[in-house]
Image: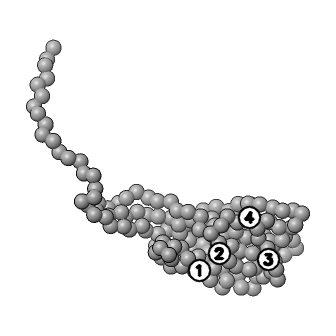
């Protein structure tokens, strides 16, 4: 397992722990996955729904230091909320209410190996299976981090200087 994989697992574990603490009274199961979340692949029992955390990729800033790679990086995580009911008498006990509670639980939270707090990038209605009464909302969070990698300057392809000959410009 690479150190990057270990970092991702640690961040996902922190997110799940935070959700477990903050959503404790809610009857939602929690898990993490590396796969795309699809309603037809997910089942839950003894719970009103399921919250799934998945690494969704990264974006990178410019290299900011000579002799090493130092880049701002945003690790993206999708938190999927899968529920059997979209709305109801008590809005906090249904999909849209759970989405709000997940955002409240995670926005501003600083997981391990992040340089700053999680921020919400977007939330969206992802999928519905009305016949099965299953609904899927996805919330994307960004986790600021740094990518730091040293490299050997001998391996760089440096520009070579050449002698410049005097050029005579003919006047017309």
Pick the residue in front: 32 or 63: 32
Q: Is residue 86 left or right of residue 126?
A: right
Rounded to the nearest angstrom, the CA distance separating label 2 from label 3 is 14 Å
How far apart in space, not on screen, are marks 1 and 2 (Cα)? Answer: 8 Å
The residue depicted at 70 percent of the width and 79 percent of the height is 30
Tag 4 residue: 38
Answer with mark 4 or mark 3, whichever residue precedes in sequence.
4
Residue beneath the point at 53% across and 66% down:
75
Q: Residue at x 49, y 68 (%)?
A: 144
Kindly state the secondary structure of the residue where label 1 is placed: helix
Residue at image mark 2: 32
Q: Up-down: is 132 above or below 13?
A: above
Q: Are marks 1 and 4 in contact (CB under 8 Å)?
A: no
* Whole-number angstrom distance, CA of label 3 to CA of label 1: 20 Å
Look at the image and tell me whether residue 66 can be seen.
Answer: yes
**Front tag of 1 and 4:** 4
Mark 1 lies on residue:
13
Using residue 169 as the reference point, say whether residue 150 is left or right of it: right
- Cα–Cα gap, marks 1 and 4: 21 Å
Q: CA distance from mark 2 to mark 4?
A: 13 Å
Q: Mark 3 sits on what residue?
A: 44
* Mark closer to the chain start, 1 or 4: 1
Residue 139 in the image, given as x and y percentages of width and height: 66, 66
Residues marked 1 and 2 touching at CB (< 8 Å): yes
**Residue 14 in the image, given as x and y percentages of width and height:** 58, 80
Question: Distance from label 4 to label 3 (Cα)?
Answer: 13 Å
The residue depicted at 40 percent of the width and 63 percent of the height is 71
Q: As rendered, which of 91 and 168 lies closer to the eye?
A: 168
């Amino acid at each position: 397992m690479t150190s990057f994989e270990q970092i991702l697992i640690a961040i996902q574990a922190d997110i799940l722990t935070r959700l477990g603490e903050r959503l404790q009274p809610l009857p939602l199961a929690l898990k993490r996955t590396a796969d795309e979340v699809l309603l037809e692949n997910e089942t839950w029992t003894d719970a009103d729904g399921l919250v799934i955390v998945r690494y969704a990729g990264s974006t990178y800033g410019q290299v900011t230091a000579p002799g090493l790679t130092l880049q701002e990086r945003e690790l993206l995580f999708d938190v999927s909320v899968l529920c059997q009911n979209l709305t109801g008498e008590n809005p906090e006990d249904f999909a849209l209410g759970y989405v709000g509670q997940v955002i409240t639980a995670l926005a501003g939270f600083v997981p391990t190996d992040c340089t700053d707090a999680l921020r919400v990038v977007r939330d969206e209605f992802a999928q519905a299976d009305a016949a099965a009464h299953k609904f899927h909302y996805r919330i994307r969070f960004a986790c600021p981090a740094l990518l730091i990698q040293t490299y050997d300057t001998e391996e760089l392809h440096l520009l070579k200087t050449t002698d410049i000959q005097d050029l005579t410009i003919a006047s017309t």
